[in-house]
Image: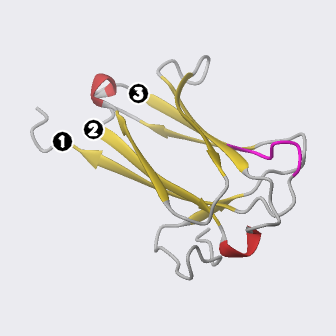
């Protein structure tokens, strides 16, 4: 679901919210890409404006699996504590043409109050793939 909570007073068209379920549980989203055609993944992340000075921040992770989710490699781990969009680009070129499972996690850092993590994810293909 597209989030309606603004960051810096605005919403992005592909912005979603990842809120931890509780102080001990993470939000955990997985998705698969068969025969991966993408050479990179760019993600932007920030806390929603209304969470500032109320949240202790959120840990945001992106993991990847090439064995159907039996094991994962960590691609990204960041602490998100501000309502300013930050961005990371992850090179996926070594995973081209492989079947992938992604796991995206939001962790509460032991206090889920106002942990309104806002995220965008863009997968970028390489036009020169054969």
Alpha carbon separation for disc pair 1 and 3: 17 Å
Range drawn in magenta: 106-111
In which quadrant is the C terminus drawn?
Answer: top left
Reading the image, the residue beneath label 3 is: 99
Alpha carbon separation for disc pair 3 and 2: 10 Å
At x 45%, y 30%, the residue is 100
Characterize the local packing of mark 1: few (<14), some (14-19) or many (20 or more) Cα atoms within 10 angstroms. Answer: few
N-terminal-most mark, 1 or 3: 3
Is 22 part of what is drawn in magenta?
no
Q: Which element carries disc 2, helix, strand or loop?
A: loop
Alpha carbon separation for disc pair 2 and 1: 7 Å
**Taking 103 as reference, is 42 above or below it?**
below
Where residue 36 appears, as percent x and y from the top left, is 33, 34
Q: Point out which mark residue 126 bears.
A: 1
* In this rendering, position of residue 64 left or right of residue 40: right
* In this rendering, position of residue 53 left or right of residue 32: right
At x 13%, y 45%, the residue is 127
**Taking 47 as reference, is 91 above or below it?**
above
Where residue 59 appears, as percent x and y from the top left, is 69, 43
At x 78%, y 67%, the residue is 53
Characterize the local packing of mark 3: few (<14), some (14-19) or many (20 or more) Cα atoms within 10 angstroms. Answer: some
Q: Point out which mark residue 37 bears.
A: 2
At x 59%, y 60%, the residue is 46
Towards the viewer: 29 or 43: 43
């Amino acid at each position: 679901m597209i989030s309606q909570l603004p960051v810096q007073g605005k919403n992005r068209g592909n912005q979603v919210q990842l809120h931890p379920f509780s102080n001990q549980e993470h939000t955990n989203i997985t998705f698969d890409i068969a025969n991966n055609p993408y050479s990179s993944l760019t993600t932007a992340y920030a806390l929603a404006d209304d969470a500032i000075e109320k949240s202790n921040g959120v840990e945001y992770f992106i993991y990847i699996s090439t064995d159907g989710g039996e094991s994962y490699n960590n691609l990204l781990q960041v602490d998100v504590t501000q309502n300013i969009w930050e961005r990371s680009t992850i090179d996926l070129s070594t995973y081209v043409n492989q079947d992938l499972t992604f796991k995206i996690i939001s962790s509460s850092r032991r206090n889920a109050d106002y942990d309104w993590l806002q995220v965008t994810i863009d997968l970028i293909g390489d036009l020169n793939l054969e």
